[in-house]
Amino acid sequence: MTTFEETPIKFLKGVGETRAGLLGSELDIAVFKDLLDYYPFRYVDRSRFYQISELSGEMPMLQILGHFVDFHVEGEGKSQRLRGIFTDGHRMMEVVWFAGIKRIAQMYKPMTQYVIFGKPGIYNNGWQMVHPEVEEYNPQRPPTGLQGIYSLTDTLRRRGVTQRVVQTAVRNLLANPKFNTIAETLPDSLIRRYGFPGIRETYRAIHFPEDPQLLRKARERMKFEELFYLELQILRYARRRNQQLQGHVFSTIGENFNRYYSECIPFELTGAQKRVLKEIRADMRTGRQMNRLLQGDVGSGKTMVAFMSMLMSADNGFQSCLMAPTEILAGQHYETVKGWADRIGLRTALLTGSTRAKARREIHEGLLSGEIDIIIGTHALLEESVEFRNLGLAVIDEQHRFGVAQRARMWGKGKIPPHVLVMTATPIPRTLAMTVYGDLEVSVIDELPPGRKPIETWLRSDANRGEVDRHIWRQIQEGRQIYIVYPLIQENEKLALKSLEQGLERVRDTFRGVGVSFVHGKMKPAEKDYQMQRFVDGETRIMVATTVIEVGVNVPNATVMVIENAERFGLSQLHQLRGRVGRGADRSWCILMSKEQLAAPTRKRLRIMTETTDGFLVSEADLKLRGPGDMEGTQQSGIAFNLKMANLATDGQIVQLARTAAEDVLSGNPVITASQEDAPRRETALALTEGELRILAGELHRRFDHQVDWSLIS
């Protein structure tokens, strides 16, 4: 039997077959529940009328009371439009329609009082509204209060599905007697604990708020609900995996680790590195599979921590692998790790898509026999032909560049899945990491090795081009190397941005006699590697590139990073690019080149880069300014966010509230995790009734059961 919420939208009064098709194709609204959950993206005050004389500058959507003086049709065919002259009794403005002209011309009559509602703009030195809402004025029922504004596509507007149509449909839905039969979506215990309104009251307040206070409470409830079920599912994933996945027991810290630490390590480990190694050591001796995220800024020493974790693996008779997203980065890791491993006699190998057939066969044999202790590679490690004798530790660098399904093949390369260490140089704020990486333990290297000089960051425009060129020349004359990054490969007439092709020509002309390399994403891998290797070897002094070098090789001699059109990049990406320099002992610079005229928010955003080199502060600012997007997203947990109202960037307190509630529910109801031992009791444990547990089960099923279950992989 179809429930009220599951009723097809075509059966709603005011919708019908045609509009239902449009709502489905344009907004994914197929049933009543979809429309209930299609929330306004903002609200406007309908409690006052504006005078045309009050309009100035950039105005919000507003309403004006008056009448039409005249209508006339202009143009022919597709360029036809209807113009109306509207007056508030004192001044006049133009109202324009580009669609539905015949219907509108017959609908509105001169000298009848109407309320027009829309966003005013300037056209031909006068005020104009395009496709406003128009309703006949009723003195007994004037527009009042807050009105929700829904996001609509151009196709919907052209086909007559306006704000008025959507609002009417929602109003009819809420007025349907069966609306009162919709089931509660949160357990009563949680509603009482946090003082939330019920689900029906919440829907009414979100779509047609009577006052701002009711709207605020309703939005808080919906944000909590979205985040609560997300956190509950993530924690269930983590506990299920912890319960089911056995891990190798690394009980020994042996000769490899002790000898390297006491005799071979080239520098003193930082306190943060030592702390993280203790956390990893504790994980790998429990008999459960380790799944740990290692966050650390560029140059903080993540690779050394990963290598010493591999030494723990070797001391217990197991092999390790390190998977990197590009051949260049894999090659860099290989050279680094091989140099360290050779000192204590561990055998290493490199496997990428470019590895020759003969060498590939030898590597396959070495992995299967156990002769190879550590393998570094790219996606090539995931091939079915790659088999290990006893893989004990898998290190994934920049994990978001690998799909979950790809990595699943790695965990199948042994009867017991390997321990997993995920490394990322993209610092993620705590509120987001709690959700994005909610099923991983998190370690943070929050200090740089001693002796590292902070990178100076300048903000410059074309007016300062001469100063920047002179600075580059001085660095070249001192034997240093330079990166210059462009947002585009080729010139694009629609985008007023500098391109690599234009830049390469200018650089060669400006810095005559200086060797120049260039790389971009459309080059063949072999050519890209050749150009990059020339720069690594010092044959060229300037590297002109797109963002393909965001995650790239380690060139300690590079001291200047110039980023053209820096205003087009996100802060986190700018920070990643900045991390390409400052890897040696020399003073380094990151120069952000931007347009002369910048909007105030853009200039403020770029100023953040000049004020701090702390990746976590940069990431926090980027999250607040741009929102989370996918960030490292669903690639990690296999759980899509699908948040309609909550915002991970700005709702940190509600994220924490939802996380705590999910932990309390799991602790008080071990049946949810199928193990009393796996849900340790908390003082705040919340035991639910059978009915409340059914609500949880139903919502978890509705929200997540269509997704692939990746809970048993990292």
Image: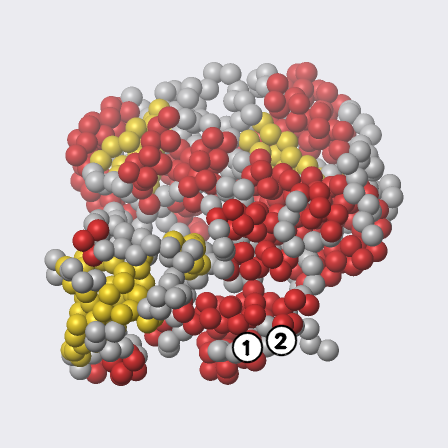
Residue in the picture at 56% in, 64% down: 36
x and y, in percent, of residue 306 in the image: 63, 32
Q: Is residue 538 above or below residue 135?
A: above
Depth order, front residue of 482/368 = 482
**Coloring scheme used:** secondary structure
Discs 2, 1 touching: Cβ within 8 Å: yes
Local SS, label 1: loop
Q: Is tag 2's residue or tag 1's residue first in the polypeptide sequence?
A: 2
Q: Which residue is mark 2?
A: 7
Which circle marks residue 113 in the picture?
Answer: none
Residue in the picture at 33% in, 45% down: 568
Which circle marks residue 12 in the picture?
Answer: 1
Residue in the picture at 61% in, 22% down: 272
Residue in the picture at 32% in, 63% down: 117
Separation of marks 2 and 1 at Cα, in angstroms: 9 Å
Q: Is residue 273 above or below residue 28?
A: above
On screen, residue 257 versus residue 28, left or right, reads right
On screen, residue 654 versus residue 589, left or right, reads right
The amino acid type of the residue labelled 2 equals Thr
x and y, in percent, of residue 62 in the image: 31, 57
Crowdedness of circle 1 by 10 Å Cα count: few (<14), some, many (20+)?
Answer: some
Local SS, label 2: loop
The amino acid type of the residue labelled 1 equals Leu
Q: Visible in this render: residue 112? A: yes
x and y, in percent, of residue 405 in the image: 64, 56
